[in-house]
C-alpha cells in the first residue's frame, strides 16, 4: 500500500474479489479530493466554520449571507411614464435632465431604432423582450429567443449600475446607486454564509448553519437530546467536554431571558437591552470575582414575566463576590436591590442632587418622587373620561373591531415567527401591542405594517414582511414612525435644528436693528455655513481629535470656547441674549423667553410637554439617549399640523423614562388620540398598557413558540385571559 501510494502520488486502486462476482476496482486517495470530479478542499479546522474568516466564508457574499442587487422595480418606479419622459430613473436622475437630453438618451434612442420600438409609449406597454434588453443588455436571454441582434453593443441599465458601483471610489456615487438596490439572500449559500464544503460537514444530520439557526432554547434541547448510542465511544470522548461547555453558555443566555433569540442573529438587529444582556451572559460565564459591574437599564425590551430571571442573574453575580450597579427605572429591579440611590429631584438643572440613599423599603416611605410612585401615593392613571374609546357617545369598542372601515386589518401575517395571523387594529384609539420578548410584536408592527404604509405614503424602498393583504389603510392619510435612532451623528445636530425651531430664531436675530444696520441675513446666525460661524472649529464648538485604536475625542474649541460663532455674530442680541446664549437655554426657559413668538412657542412647548423641559436647545445629538431622541422626534411631529387621520407608531417609547416622565408622555399620546388620530405602541411597561384603549397580546412564548394571537380587547379583557402572560401581571 505504501509503495502504491508513493508511485501513484497519493492515489491507489485496489482490486478485490467478492465471492464469484467480477473483480471490482476501488479508488483510494491520501488527499481531501475526489479523483472523479476534481473537488478538493483544505483540511477542516475550527476557523473553517467561521463566516468571518476567509477560510470558511462564502466567496460570493464574503460571509454576509446577503448581497445588494439592483431592483428592476426601482429602475422603473413609474411604469406609466415613457422612456422619453425619463422612465429609467437612474439614468434620468444621473443626467439631471428628463426627456431628449443627455448621453443616456442617445443610447436609448439608438436601441429603439435597432429593436424597432417606440420611446413614446408607456413602459408597461413595451414588449417583455424590450424591457429585458433595457435592463440586462445585449446578451439578454429574451433577445436570443427572439433571434434578434443589435447593431452595436448595449450594456443594459443593471450591468451598467453594477459596474459603476464596484468600480467607483466616490461615496456619493455609491450612495446614489444604492438607492436602486435591495438586499437579497445570497444565491450561492442561501444565507448560510459559509462555503458549500463546510456546510457539507454534519453533526447528527445537521450542519453548523442549521444549529446556529435554532433559537437558544431549541439549541439547548438539541444538545441535551444527544444520546450515548448516537455516537461511537471515541466520538463520545471528543464530544462530551465540548457539549458541556456549549450547554453552560446557553444556560447563561437563558438566565437573562434571551431564549427566543437565534444563535446566528445579526448584532445589528438587536435592541440595546438585548445586546447588554448578551454581554452580561458573557461575564457570568467568565466566573470572575471582585469585579464592579455597571449596567444601564438592562430591562429594556424585557417582559415583566422575564424580569425575575434577569434579577436572579444579577443576584448571582453579586453572590460570586462582585458589586453590581444598575441604572434602572423598573419597579421590580428597584424592589430587589440591596441599596438604592435616588438622584433628582428633577431633570437637567433641577437635578444632580442625591435625594435618597437606603433600602427599597425606606425609599417607599420617603417623600421623593420615586418613593411616592413605588408606594402608590402617586400613580400613572388616567380617568375613564379621558378615553375616547370608552366615551360611549362617540364610539363603541365592538363596532370598532367589527367594522372594517374603522380598522386596519392585516391578513395572513407570516413574517419571522408569525403564524399566518390576521389582526384588526381599530383606528382613532390608543392601541398597545404586547407579549413576551420575541413573541412577534416588532415583526408585525415594524416589519409588516410600518414598512407597508411607508411604501404606500412615501414610496419607501424597504419591502414589508410576509403578509397576504392589508385592508383599511385608505382611512389614513399620514403615518409617522417614531423610533429611537439618533437625530444626528455629529455635534451639529441638536433639538433646535431637528424640530425646526432654529429657523425662526435666526430670523428673529436677523430682524434686530443692529443686524439690519450691519446687513446680516439669517444665514449669518447659522453655525453650519461660513459667515457667522467660528472658522477654527467650523461651527461645531468642539474639535475632533482622532485617536488610533481608541474612539475619537472631542475637545472644546479654543477660539470660540464652545459658542460656535465668531465675535461679530455674538455681538447681535435679542432681548439681551446672543444666539449662543439662546442655544444654551433649557427648553422650559426658552418657552417663556419666546412666549410672544407663536411659531417658536408651539415648537418649544411640545418639547416641554413630552418631558424635555430640562434639555438645552443646542445640546449635541451625540449626547442624547435613545429615549430622548425618540421624544424629540415625537415633539417634532406634534408641532406639525395633524390631520386627524394620522397613525403614530412607537416602539417602546418608555425606554429611559421615570414614572413621572411616563405620565407626561401618556398625556401627549392621549391628546393625539383625542384629536382623532391613532397611536400604536409596542410596549412592555404595564403603566402604559393599562391606559391603552385596545390591547393586542401576542405569544404565548418567544421565537418558534410565539407568533400567535393570545388575547385581544381592553385591559380588563386581557387580564381575564388565562393564557396571557401580560394579563397575569396587568392588575397585580
Image: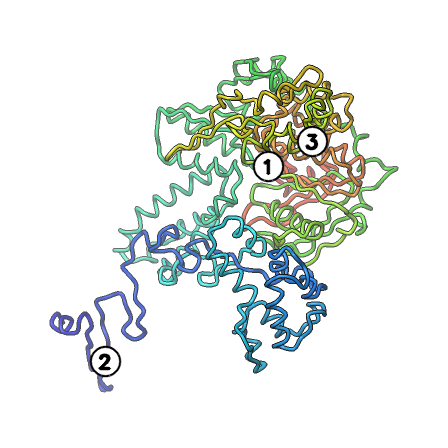
- Circle 1: is it few (<14), some (14-19), or many (20+) Cα within 10 Å? some
Numbered disc 3: secondary structure: helix
Q: CA distance from mark 3 to mark 1?
A: 24 Å
Numbered disc 1: secondary structure: loop
Residue 169 bears which disc, if any?
A: none
Looking at the image, can residue 230 be seen?
A: yes
The color scheme shown is: rainbow
In the displayed structure image, the side of residue 192 where residue 524 appears, left or right: right
The residue indicated by pointer 1 is 484
Mark 3 or mark 1: whose residue is earlier in sequence? 1
Question: Given this view, does label 3 or label 2 mark the residue nearer the observer?
Answer: 3
Q: Residue 157: image x %, image y %?
A: 57, 64
The residue indicated by pointer 3 is 503
Q: CA distance from mark 2 to mark 1?
A: 68 Å
Residue 25 bears which disc, if any?
A: 2
**Picture quarter with the C terminus:** top right
Q: Residue at x 35, y 24 (%)?
A: 290
Q: Residue 206: image x %, image y %?
A: 40, 58
Image quadrant of residue 442? top right
Question: Given this view, does label 2 or label 1 mark the residue nearer the observer?
Answer: 1
Mark 3 or mark 2: whose residue is earlier in sequence? 2
Q: Residue furthest left?
A: 3
Q: Residue 106: image x %, image y %?
A: 61, 67
Amino acid at each position: 500500500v505504501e509503495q502504491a501510494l508513493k508511485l501513484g502520488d497519493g492515489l491507489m486502486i485496489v482490486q478485490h474479489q467478492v465471492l464469484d462476482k467480477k473483480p471490482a476496482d476501488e479508488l483510494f486517495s491520501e488527499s481531501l479530493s475526489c479523483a472523479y470530479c476534481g473537488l478538493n478542499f483544505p483540511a477542516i479546522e475550527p476557523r473553517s466554520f467561521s463566516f468571518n474568516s476567509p477560510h470558511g466564508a462564502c466567496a460570493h457574499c464574503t460571509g454576509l449571507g446577503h448581497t445588494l442587487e439592483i431592483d428592476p422595480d426601482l429602475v422603473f418606479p413609474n411604469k406609466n411614464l415613457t422612456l422619453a419622459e425619463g422612465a429609467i430613473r437612474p439614468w434620468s436622475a444621473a443626467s439631471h435632465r428628463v426627456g431628449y437630453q443627455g448621453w443616456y438618451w442617445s443610447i436609448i434612442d439608438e436601441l429603439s431604432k435597432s429593436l424597432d420600438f417606440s420611446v413614446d409609449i408607456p413602459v408597461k406597454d413595451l414588449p417583455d423582450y424590450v424591457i429585458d434588453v433595457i435592463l440586462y443588455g445585449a446578451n439578454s436571454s429574451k433577445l436570443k429567443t427572439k433571434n434578434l441582434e443589435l447593431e452595436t453593443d448595449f450594456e443594459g441599465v443593471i450591468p451598467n449600475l453594477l459596474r459603476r458601483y464596484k468600480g467607483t471610489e466616490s461615496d456619493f456615487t455609491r450612495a446614489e446607486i444604492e438607492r436602486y438596490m435591495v438586499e437579497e439572500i445570497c444565491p450561492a449559500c442561501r444565507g448560510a454564509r459559509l462555503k458549500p464544503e463546510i456546510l457539507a460537514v454534519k453533526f447528527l444530520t445537521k450542519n453548523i448553519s442549521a444549529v446556529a439557526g435554532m433559537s437558544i432554547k431549541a439549541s439547548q434541547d438539541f444538545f441535551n437530546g444527544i444520546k450515548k448510542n448516537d455516537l461511537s465511544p471515541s466520538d463520545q470522548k471528543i464530544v462530551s467536554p465540548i457539549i458541556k461547555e456549549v450547554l453552560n453558555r446557553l444556560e447563561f443566555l437563558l438566565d437573562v431571558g434571551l431564549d427566543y433569540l437565534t444563535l446566528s442573529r445579526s448584532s445589528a438587529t438587536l435592541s440595546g437591552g438585548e445586546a447588554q444582556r448578551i454581554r452580561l451572559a458573557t461575564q457570568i460565564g467568565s466566573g470572575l470575582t471582585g469585579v464592579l459591574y455597571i449596567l444601564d437599564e438592562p430591562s429594556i425590551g424585557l417582559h415583566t414575566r422575564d424580569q425575575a430571571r434577569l434579577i436572579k442573574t444579577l443576584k448571582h453575580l453579586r453572590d460570586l463576590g462582585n458589586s453590581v450597579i444598575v441604572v434602572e427605572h423598573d419597579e421590580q429591579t428597584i424592589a430587589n436591590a440591596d441599596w438604592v440611590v435616588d438622584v433628582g429631584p428633577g431633570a437637567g438643572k433641577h437635578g444632580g442632587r442625591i435625594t435618597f440613599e437606603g433600602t427599597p423599603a425606606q425609599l417607599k416611605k420617603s417623600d421623593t418622587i420615586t418613593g411616592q410612585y413605588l408606594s402608590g401615593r402617586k400613580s400613572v392613571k388616567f380617568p375613564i373620561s379621558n378615553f375616547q374609546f370608552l366615551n360611549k357617545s362617540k364610539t363603541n369598542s365592538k363596532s370598532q373591531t367589527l367594522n372594517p372601515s374603522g380598522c386596519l386589518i392585516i391578513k395572513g401575517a407570516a413574517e419571522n415567527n408569525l403564524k399566518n395571523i390576521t389582526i384588526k387594529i381599530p383606528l382613532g384609539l390608543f392601541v398597545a401591542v404586547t407579549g413576551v420578548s420575541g413573541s412577534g410584536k416588532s415583526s408585525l408592527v415594524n416589519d409588516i405594517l410600518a414598512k407597508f404604509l411607508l411604501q404606500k405614503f412615501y414610496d419607501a424602498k424597504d419591502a414589508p414582511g410576509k403578509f397576504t393583504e392589508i385592508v383599511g389603510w385608505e382611512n389614513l392619510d399620514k403615518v409617522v414612525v417614531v423610533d429611537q435612532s439618533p437625530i444626528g451623528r455629529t455635534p451639529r445636530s441638536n433639538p433646535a435644528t431637528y424640530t425646526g425651531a432654529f429657523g425662526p430664531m435666526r430670523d428673529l436675530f436677523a430682524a434686530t436693528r443692529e443686524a439690519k444696520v450691519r446687513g446680516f441675513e439669517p444665514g449669518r446666525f447659522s453655525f453650519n455655513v461660513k459667515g457667522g460661524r467660528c472658522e477654527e472649529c467650523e461651527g461645531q464648538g468642539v474639535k475632533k481629535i482622532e485617536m488610533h485604536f481608541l474612539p475619537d475625542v472631542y475637545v472644546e474649541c479654543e477660539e470660540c470656547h464652545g459658542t460656535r460663532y465668531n465675535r461679530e455674530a455674538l455681538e447681535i442680541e435679542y432681548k439681551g441674549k446672543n444666539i449662543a446664549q439662546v442655544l444654551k437655554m433649557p427648553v422650559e426657559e426658552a418657552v417663556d423667553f419666546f412666549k410672544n413668538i407663536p411659531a417658536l412657542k408651539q415648537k418649544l412647548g411640545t418639547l416641554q410637554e413630552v418631558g424635555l423641559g430640562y434639555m438645552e436647545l443646542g445640546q449635541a445629538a451625540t449626547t442624547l439617549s435613545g429615549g430622548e431622541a425618540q421624544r424629540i422626534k415625537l415633539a417634532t411631529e406634534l408641532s406639525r399640523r395633524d390631520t386627524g387621520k394620522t397613525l403614530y407608531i412607537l416602539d417602546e417609547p418608555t425606554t429611559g423614562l421615570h414614572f413621572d416622565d411616563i405620565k407626561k408622555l401618556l398625556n401627549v399620546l392621549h391628546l393625539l388620540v383625542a384629536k382623532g388620530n391613532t397611536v400604536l405602541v409596542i410596549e412592555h411597561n404595564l403603566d402604559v398598557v393599562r391606559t391603552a384603549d385596545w390591547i393586542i397580546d401576542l405569544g404565548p412564548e418567544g421565537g418558534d413558540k410565539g407568533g400567535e394571537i393570545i388575547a385581544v380587547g381592553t385591559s380588563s379583557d386581557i387580564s381575564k385571559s388565562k393564557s396571557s402572560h401580560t394579563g397575569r401581571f396587568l392588575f397585580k
